[in-house]
């Protein structure tokens, strides 16, 4: 009788532990990271086309691949899914980013940091400050909301392979400057 009770308890605890490991949930950090990577890749493609490092056919091929990844991203966004699905999407973005960088690297890069790279850097800075505890929770949420808004607007500007106008890029840059200045005050 004791063996049966012990085995039953062992099975129940094993199943509960397994179900806890395989929970399905939303992954906002994965969403933000994917959005940032898509913005950077979009900018690299646009710059490569502008500088002549990419032919129109190459840029179209990369944009088509990015559009497919964006479609899959949209299907995962705000849904409860396993982390492995986000990891697979991140892997595809990494591979595409490396391919674009290899193709574009034939010419000199633009020296000033682009908005996509700045968004990615600010995201890492906010994450680091929140994890270290140097950024109070309320301010961290405010900074994250501001960066999410900027990233969302910039993604909308570059949706469907469109290259943001000079005025749009300047507006995003100004908003990023303001956010960065405010974030640096907490250091």
Image: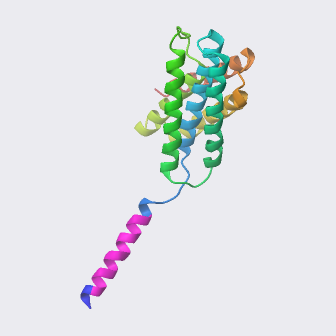
Residue pictured at 62% horizontal, 36% vertical: 148
- x, y percent for residue 176: 61, 23
Q: Residue furthest front?
A: 57
Residue 63: x and y, percent? 65, 28
Identify the residue at the far bottom of this view. Answer: 1
**Is 48 left or right of 91, judged from the image as shown?**
right
Q: What are the residue bounds of the magenta stretch?
A: 4-19
Q: Quadrant of residue 20?
A: bottom left
84 vs 114, nearest the viewer: 84
Residue 103 in view of the camera: yes
Q: Nearer the viewer, residue 36 or 58?
A: 58
Q: Is 75 rendered above or below residue 109?
A: below
Magenta segment includes 8: yes
Q: How many marks?
A: 0
Residue 182 spot, x, y in % from top left = 57, 25
Q: Is residue 105 magenta?
A: no
Locate residue 100, reporting x and y percent: 54, 23
Q: On the rendered structure, is 153 left or right of 83? A: right
Query: Which image quadrant is residue 132 in?
Result: top left
Vertical comparison of 44 with 133: above or below: above
Return the residue nearer the eye: 42 or 149: 42
Is any atom of residue 185 visible in this view?
Answer: no
Q: Decide if residue 113 is on the left or right side of residue 165.
A: left
Q: Is residue 58 above or below residue 22?
A: above
Question: For the point 64% across and 38% down, which residue is it?
Answer: 68
Identify the residue at image location x=65%, y=12%. Answer: 50
Q: Main secondary structure of the magenta part?
A: helix
Residue at the (72%, 25%) spot, across then down: 162
Q: Could you say which quadrant of the image residue 74 lies in? A: top right
């Amino acid at each position: 009788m004791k063996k049966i009770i012990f085995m039953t308890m062992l099975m129940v605890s094993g199943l509960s532990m397994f179900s806890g490991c395989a929970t399905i949930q939303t992954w906002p950090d994965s969403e933000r990271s994917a959005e940032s990577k898509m913005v950077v890749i979009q900018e690299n493609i646009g710059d490569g086309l502008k500088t002549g490092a990419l032919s129109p056919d190459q840029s179209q091929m990369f944009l088509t691949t990015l559009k497919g990844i964006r479609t899959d991203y949209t299907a995962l966004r705000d849904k409860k899914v396993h982390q492995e699905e986000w990891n697979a999407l991140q892997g595809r973005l990494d591979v595409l980013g490396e391919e674009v960088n290899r193709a574009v690297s034939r010419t000199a890069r633009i020296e000033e940091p682009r908005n996509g790279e700045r968004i990615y850097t600010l995201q890492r800075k906010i994450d680091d400050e929140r994890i270290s505890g140097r950024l109070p929770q309320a301010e961290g949420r405010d900074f994250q909301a501001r960066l999410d808004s900027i990233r969302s607007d910039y993604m909308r500007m570059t949706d469907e392979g469109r290259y943001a106008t000079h005025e749009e890029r300047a507006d995003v840059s100004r908003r990023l400057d303001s956010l960065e200045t405010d974030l640096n005050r907490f250091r």
